Image (cartoon, grey):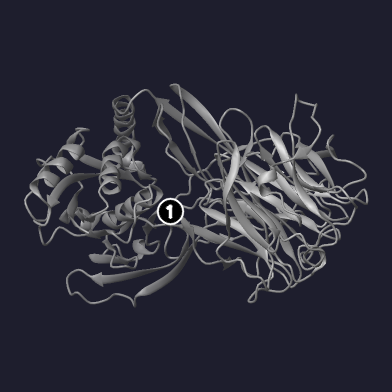
Amino acid sequence: MARYLPILFLLTWLTHAEIYAQADRYTVKVAPFSSRIHDEFSPVFYQGGIVFCSNQSNNTLVSYQDEQNGLFKIFFVAQTNSTGWKQPKIFSRDITTDVNDGPVTFSKDECTVYYARNNSVEKLMRNISDTGNKLGIYSAELADGRWTNIKPFPYNDPKYSFCTPALAPDGERIYFSSDMPGGSGGMDLYYCDRRNNGWDRPVNMGTVINTSKNESFPFAGRYGKLFFASDGHPGYGGKDLFYTQEINGEWIVPVHLDSAINSPADDFGLVADSTFEQGYFSTNRRKTDDIFSFNSAPVEFPSCDTIKENNYCFTFYDEQRQLIDTIPVIYQWDFGNGIKRTGAEVRHCFPGSGRYTVKLSITDELTGKAIAEQVEYEVELEDIRQAYINSYNAWIVDKSLSFDAGKSNLEGFRVTDYLWDFGNGFKSGQPFMNYTFEKKGEYTVRLGLLGEKDSQGIIPKTCAIKKIRVYDHYEEMALKEEREEDARNDEADAGAVQTKTMQIRVYFMDDLSERQKEKIRSELTGTGISTVMFDQYGIKPSSIPFLDDVAAVLQNNPEIRLEMVLRADEEETQENTMDMSEKCAQELAFYFKRNEINLDASHFRGMDSSNPAFSTTIPDNNNMDGIMELLFMKN
C-alpha cells in the first residue's frame, strides 16, 4: 500500500505466508493379485474387493482407439484381510461377451454398473479382430443377484469409440473418453449430466484438459477432483496420471501426480479413497500391465500462521488544514458510488481490495466558494498475503458450519490441493467445506495449501489456523456476542468495528393464499428473532436461525419467490462510514447462494428510507440501524 498526501490514513502492512516444501509423499508396490504373465488394469472398488480388467491369453494392451488385439474380461478379486486376497474370478457371466469387456464404474449403491465393450458381440472372428468394431458404453442393473436390463449408452456411435466410463460420487455425472468429432484430437474426455433419469448430451471438457493426443481413464474422486491419464500433457513419458478440479465453474490446469506414481512407462487407470490416502493404479513399468497399490504419508506442516483479518477501514484528514484554521471551511470527501462524507476528519470502510478514487473538496463555509481545486487521489488496497479461512468464529453443536478457502491470497502460489484438519489430521478436500462439531468447546481448524511443483520437483505448501468457539445453543452464543459487542462499542471512538442491526419486516403479496401466508408466518416467527445483525465480517452467527428458516421456506416451496429490500435509516444513509445496506445485501446474497437458493428467483438490494412499503407483520423495535423487508410472492 502507499500513503497519499494530503490524505493520511491508517494502513495494515502486508505479511507474506512462509512457504515450506514437501517432496514425494507416496509409497507404491505391486498389488498381490497382479501377475507377471497377464495384463491387469483399471481397478475400481467393489464390495470390499477390486474389480479390474485382465486378459488370459497374451500380454497385449488393448488400445482404446482402434486396435483390439487381445480379449479383456472383467474380473473380481475379494480381500480376505489387510494383506490377503483370494484368487481373481470372472466378475459376472451376465455381462461377459465373446469380445472385449471393461473397464467398469459402479453407482454409489453398487446396484448399477456402467462398462465398456465392443459394440458387436456376435461370436465371429471378424468381429473380434475387426478394427471397425468400436467400443461403446453399456449399463446393467443388479436384481436378485443377476445383472439385468443391459442398455447401450444413448450416445454410442458405431463409427467412434466410447469407453473408460467413470461415475461421479453422487451419480449425477458420468465421464468417459471418446474420439467422436469435435474434439482436440485422439481421445478426448467428455461428460454427461443426468437429467430426468437420462443423460444430457456429451460436453467436451475443453482444451485445458484435452490435448491433440489422448486423454482417457477418468476417475471422479470426492470433492470434485477428476483424475485421468494423458500422453499429451508434459510428463515423464508415455501415459501419465494427472488430476484437475472444478473451482468456481472452471477446471484448473491439470496437476501432474507424484513421481512415485508416475514413471517413464504408461501410468493410468487410478482409483483412490475419499481422502486420497490410499488406492491403486495401473502401470506397464514391468513390461506388462500391472496394478500397483499406493499409500501416502500424512502431510505435515512445520508451522501454521494465525489468520489476520483484512482491514479496509481508515481515518482520513487533511494534513494541510492547520494552514487554513482561521477560515471556517467545509471538507467534502467523495468515496465514489454516491458515498460522501463531510468533516475535517472522517472514517471510511472500503468494500474490499482494489483501486479506489478519493476526492476532497474544500469550500469557504461563508461564501460557498472553493478554496482550492478539487484534489483526487488513487488508493490501492491489497489483501494480506496468507492462506485464509472464511467462516464464523462462533457456532453451535450438531449444526453444519461452512469453511471457505477461496479468499486465500498467495503471490506466485497456484493452489493444487486443499487440505483441512478439523482435529483428526489433514485430509484432502476442496475450497469449500462443511463440518459439524459434536461437543461444546474451542476448536482449532487448520487449512493447508499445496502448490504446483517447482523446477526441482518440490511442492510448496503453507498453512493457516483459525479458532472456532462452539456453544450448546444459539441463545448461549447470542449472549456471548452481546457481551463482546458491548465491549467493542465501548472502544468505538478508537475505531472498533460496530454491529449494525436490521429490523425484520415480512410482507405477503395477495397472490399467496391465506394458508400459505399463515404457514410462512409461523415458520419465520418460530425462532423468536426479529432482527438480523451484521458487522464488517458478515452476518452475525446469532442471526443464522432466522435466515435458515427463510432458506427452508424457499427450498420447501419452489413456487414462492422472495424480494428482499434493505433500507438504512436517514441518519445512517448520511453519516455511516460505508453503504451499510448494500454491504448487508451482498452478505445475504452470498448466504443464500451457499444454501443453494436460486438467486435468479430471489433479489437482494439496498435502499434508503424513502418509499415505505406495506404494513409490518413483526412489531417495530427501537435502536435499529435499518429495516430488512421480506416480500413473499408467487414465482
Give the left or right position of residue 554, taking residue 78 as reference: left
Estimate the x, y position of residue 118 in percent, counting from the top left. Answer: 71, 61
Estimate the x, y position of residue 313 in percent, counting from the top left. Answer: 40, 52
What residue type is disc 1 on? Tyr
**Quadrant in which the C terminus is drawn:** bottom left
Estimate the x, y position of residue 452 in percent, counting from the top left. Answer: 72, 54
For the question of whether residue 278 can be seen, the reply is no
* Residue displayed at 86% across by 47% down: 56
Of residues 415 and 627, the one nearer the viewer is 415
Asked if residue 528 is positioned above or below residue 22 in the image, the reply reads above
Asked if residue 292 is positioned above or below residue 369 in the image, the reply reads above
- Of helix, strand and loop, which one carries label 1? loop
Of residues 524 and 160, the one nearer the viewer is 160
Estimate the x, y position of residue 554 in percent, counting from the top left. Answer: 27, 49
Q: Which residue is mark 1?
A: 312
Residue, far left = 615
Give the left or right position of residue 552, taking residue 150 as reference: left
Residue, far front = 123
For the question of whether residue 233 can be seen, the reply is yes
| Mark 1 surroundings within 10 Å by alpha-carbon count, few (fewer than 14), some (14 through 19), many (20 or more) | some
Give the left or right position of residue 149, taking residue 69 as reference: left
Of residues 306 and 238, the one nearer the viewer is 238
